[in-house]
Amino acid sequence: MARDSGSGRLITPQLLLKAYSVGIFPMAEDARDKHVFWVEPEMRGVLPLDERFHVSHSLAKAIRRKPFDIRFDTAFSAVVDACAEPSPGRPRTWINRTIRDLYAELFRMGHAHSVEAWRGDQLAGGLYGVSLGGAFFGESMFSRETDASKICLVYLVERLREKGFVLLDTQFITEHLKTFGAIELPKAQYERILAEAIEVDASF
């Protein structure tokens, strides 16, 4: 269990899922910080699961070459650990030990998942997130090889479509996500969509 740095309240996996259900998620100042804080953005990033989701011609071509073996939920902890590592352009991350432990418990409960790009026995890239009803909350991604995380994202969208999900939350918007068609929604609009999504009977 984790402790909320603001109130001192213990954060359980059940409390974490409740937070997601109302549009709140946790972060840490950096990987060395023992505490977490709650985040509730006024503008929320969403990646549409319909025809607005865009895959560039170059990425589609790369996917057709099948450079990686894509797997689901076979190395969740390794993906989270890799997302927590510093990388070029990202010397600090918000994933601390507290967050790792909480999401490992969500994984054991069937509410957290990973998409992994493998080359042989080496993990080349991946992403992880949380599922609740028909909503999937993307948390973080990493790449050790070109296009690895992008390809994982495309496979994630395909999986969510197949399984009946209706919302892919990206928390914030980045230039990288914009190339896939990500949009921003005001908090009130996002909360209405979220409330409907978590009532959907979907399973990752």
Image (tube, rainbow, N blue to C red):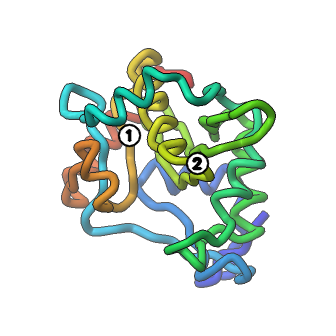
- Left or right: 106 as drawn, with respect to 160: right
Q: Residue 168 — which label? A: 1
Q: Position of residue 157 (x, y in %)?
A: 41, 30
Q: Position of residue 43 (x, y in %)?
A: 25, 64
Q: Secondary structure at mark 1?
A: strand
Q: Residue 145 — which label? A: 2
Q: Nearer the viewer, residue 17 or 69?
A: 69
Q: Secondary structure at mark 2?
A: loop
- Left or right: 35 as drawn, with respect to 181: right
Dot 2 amino acid type: Glu
Q: Position of residue 66 (x, y in %)?
A: 53, 23
Q: Quadrant of the C terminus?
A: top right
Give above or below for 159 relative to 186.
above
Q: Nearer the viewer, residue 169 or 77?
A: 77
Q: Residue at x 66, y 50 (%)?
A: 14
Q: Residue at x 45, y 61 (%)?
A: 24
Dot 1 amino acid type: Leu
Residue 119, can we see it?
yes
Q: Residue at x 74, y 80 (%)?
A: 34
Q: Quadrant of the N terminus?
A: bottom right
**Most extreme residue toward the top, as rendered?**
162
Q: Position of residue 99 (x, y in %)?
A: 69, 63
Give above or below for 162 relative to 67.
above
Disc 1 to disc 2, how far (Cα)? 24 Å
